[in-house]
Structures are given as structure tokens and as C-alpha cells.
Image (tube, rainbow, N blue to C red):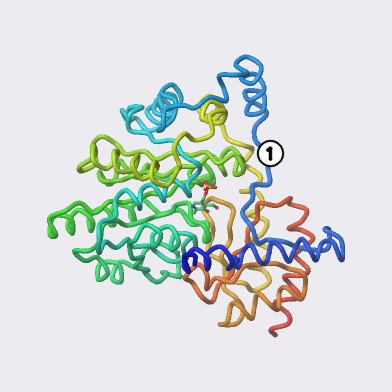
Amino acid sequence: MVSERMKGLGTARSVIRELFEYGKLRAAEIGPENVFDFSIGNPSVPAPAAVNETAIRLLREQPDLIHAYTSAQGAPEARQRFADSLNRRFGASYTADRLYLTVGAAASLCCVFNGLTCPGDEFIVFAPYFPEYKVFIEGAGAKMVLIPPEIEAFQIDFDAFEKAVTPHTKGVLINSPNNPSGVVYSKATLERLAAVLTEKSQAYGHPIYLISDEPYREIVYAGVEAPWVPHIYRDTIVCYSFSKSLSLPGERIGYVLVPKEVAEGDDVYAAVAGAGRSLGYVNAPSLFQQVTSLCCDMTSDINIYEENAKLFVSALREMGYHVVEPGGAFYLFPRSLEPDDVAFSERAKKLDLLVVPGSGFGAPGHVRVSYCVQPDTIRRSLPKFKALADSYK
Ligand code: PLP
């Protein structure tokens, strides 16, 4: 006998993975240049040279030490460097003892959900959303409450949101810049969100935490402001990752920040650390604790994503697709040309164009297009998008 839930999770492939695997098989059949795979969010630009150089230097200088266990919550000097960097950038005064280093944003989120959840707790998530959130929240024994998308701008439907906040609401999860819409929440949206949370926390007599999942924080386009969320709402817990900003998804490194000001902050940090312990997420990879903390003020060359976005948005709009302008990350979320996004994605697949149905992100009638690819791939894919649009005329 095994856990049915875990067996289900271990055997069911995500739609994204399924398309990605299909793309690889198809590429072997007809050549990779003929498959336009926009399914997965794997950064297409390499990590900065300094990342590899730092890793090599540390391996040479500290060949034994660098592989040793660190403190469960991460090496103090690495945490201090992250705190210093945040303080420089955001005018804050965070301390090393409020950072918990762990294996990417996924583990950061799991530590937070597991650390916060008491019986009966709920977490609110806004569609469109990263589908793993449901797995993480339910894995912590909590309930995910989904707010339908506001499809004109992919900001927040506040009427639906306010109705969904109840005494059971332990936290609200946001992700800006967003996967899959690419949209960045405006300051006005965040301020309104903060006002509702402040009012509801007072009304219900307990804090409602805002969990800010920020793996795309650095990937924000010119003229777009991505406000520092803890400055807008006090009870914010930040989950960060170097998977996208430094193009290091395989190295599994990120952190949770529980600012001192957060309500019951000592307990929250202790519970996050306890969850890390109980989940076996202690001691994030030692080499990359050091490497990322020494390189955390730099990013990969993310300009290419902005160029890709411009190219894609204008071309698709010209063909008649409806696309909300992305402000960052590396995803577009156009409307499918028929209400059934799964059927639309299947029709695209017949043209060797791989786009992910929006239903899995809680936003049917859309598809996700990951444009972390070479600009040439986008250019060559445009006739396929045109053929797809024409097939609906
Ligand atoms: N959150 C969002 C919105 C993501 O898009 C991803 C990965 O694509 C993650 C979390 C997980 O990131 P990590 O690789 O740091 O675990």
C-alpha cells in the first residue's frame, strides 16, 4: 500500500511536461528546427560568466569546505550577503537571521505553506496561476481558494477576492511578474490588496499573510514598475529563487524572507525553519549558497526576453490574436481563437506549434506561450501562428 495522493502526483504528468516531452520526440522525427516548442519556462540565456567563474574559484580555493554541511537555514555569511543586497536595493534593514535558504522557490513556498497551516486554513490564489501551487498548498494540508481571472489586464478581480476572504484565510499568494500572463501587478493593485488584507485581518482578529512568490522579480521590462511588496503590506513573506534571474533552475537555490516587522514574525520564521526540517529541505546546496550570494546583484542577460516579447506581441496582434501586454517574466497568455483552449492547443500542435492550454492555469480560453527561446525561433514560428489564425477564418 502506498499513499494514493502521492502515487497520483508521481504518475500524472503535468500538461506542460507532456507537451515538452512530445516536443522532444517530435524533434527527433522531423528535426528540432521544425518544432516550435513554447511549452516550458527554461531560461534560454546562460548564467552570467561570473557565476561559473565564482563556482570554479570556490572549488579551487575551498575544495573540501565548499561541500560541507552548512547551518540548516543556510551559511550565515551567505544569508548576510543576501540581506545586504536587499537592503541596498530596497532601502530595508533585513538581517541574516530572517532568511531561510532552500532549494528554489518551490521549496520556499512549501516551507511557508507547511509552516503556516493550522487545521481548516485556506490560502487564496489568483488565476491565472502556476499549477504547482495547488500541489504545494494541499500538500501542507490547507485548502486552495481560487479567484477567477480578471481577463482584461490580469490584475485582480477585487469583488470576487473580497467575497473569498473569510476567517479561515491564513494567507494570500501573489506572483508578479506572473507565470503565465507575464503581467506585473501595479502599485495601485498592490495597495488595494494591502488595504483589503489590513481591514480583514483586523476584522477577523488574526494576521492574513501575503506570500509573494517572486522568481521573476528581476525580469521586468523598461517603463514597468515592480514595487517591493513588503513596503506595501507589512505581513508579507517573500519567496525567491535564482532559477530565472541567474538562469540556474537546475541548481535549486532560493530563499524565504520573513521580515522582522511581520506579525508573529519570530514564530513564522521558526515555523518556516521547522517545515524545512520536516520536509528535508535543510541546507540548500552549499556551493550555490556561496555562488549566488556572491553574484546576487547581477542577472543573466535578460534583455533578450524583452526583445522577444515586443516581437511576439506585435506580430500576434497583427494576425488578430488578443494578447495582454506582458510587463516581465517570459510568458505571453493570448486568448485562444476558440473557447476550448485544449482543442486550440491540439490544433496548434498539428502545426508543430506547442502552446499550453490555459485551463491548467485556471484561465480557460487562453494559452501560455513561453518565449524564453532564441528570437530566430519566434521569427520562424510566425507563419505557423498565421496559419493557425487563418484556419479559424
Ligand atoms: N513559482 C513560479 C511562478 C514559477 O514559475 C516557478 C518555476 O517555473 C516556481 C515557482 C518554482 O521555481 P524554482 O525553480 O525556483 O523552484
Location of the C terminus (image quadrant) = bottom right
Which residue lies at the image location 61% right of the left edge and 20% below the top edge? 58
Horizontal and vertical percent position of residue 211 = 35, 50
> What residue is disc 1 on?
46
Amino acid type at circle 1 is Pro
Is the distance from the Cβ of mark 1 to the nearest ligand 1 atom less than 8 Å? no
Horizontal and vertical percent position of residue 13 = 60, 66
Q: Is residue 151 above or below residue 299?
A: below
Q: Is residue 326 above or below residue 385?
A: above
Which residue lies at the image location 31% right of the left edge and 42% below the top edge? 230
Q: Is residue 367 above or below residue 92?
A: below
Give left or right: position of 177 versus 275.
Answer: right
Quadrant location of residue 153? bottom left
Q: Residue furthest front?
A: 1
Which residue lies at the image location 62% right of the left edge and 23% below the top edge? 54
Give left or right: position of 121 versus 297.
Answer: left
Horizontal and vertical percent position of residue 373 = 70, 52
* Count of picture labels: 1
Horizontal and vertical percent position of residue 323 = 57, 66
Give left or right: position of 388 versus 295.
Answer: right
Q: Residue furthest bottom?
A: 393
Sort mark 1 into few (<14), some (14-19) or many (20+) by Cα contacts within 10 Å. few
Quadrant location of residue 126? bottom left
Which element carries disc 1, helix, strand or loop?
A: loop
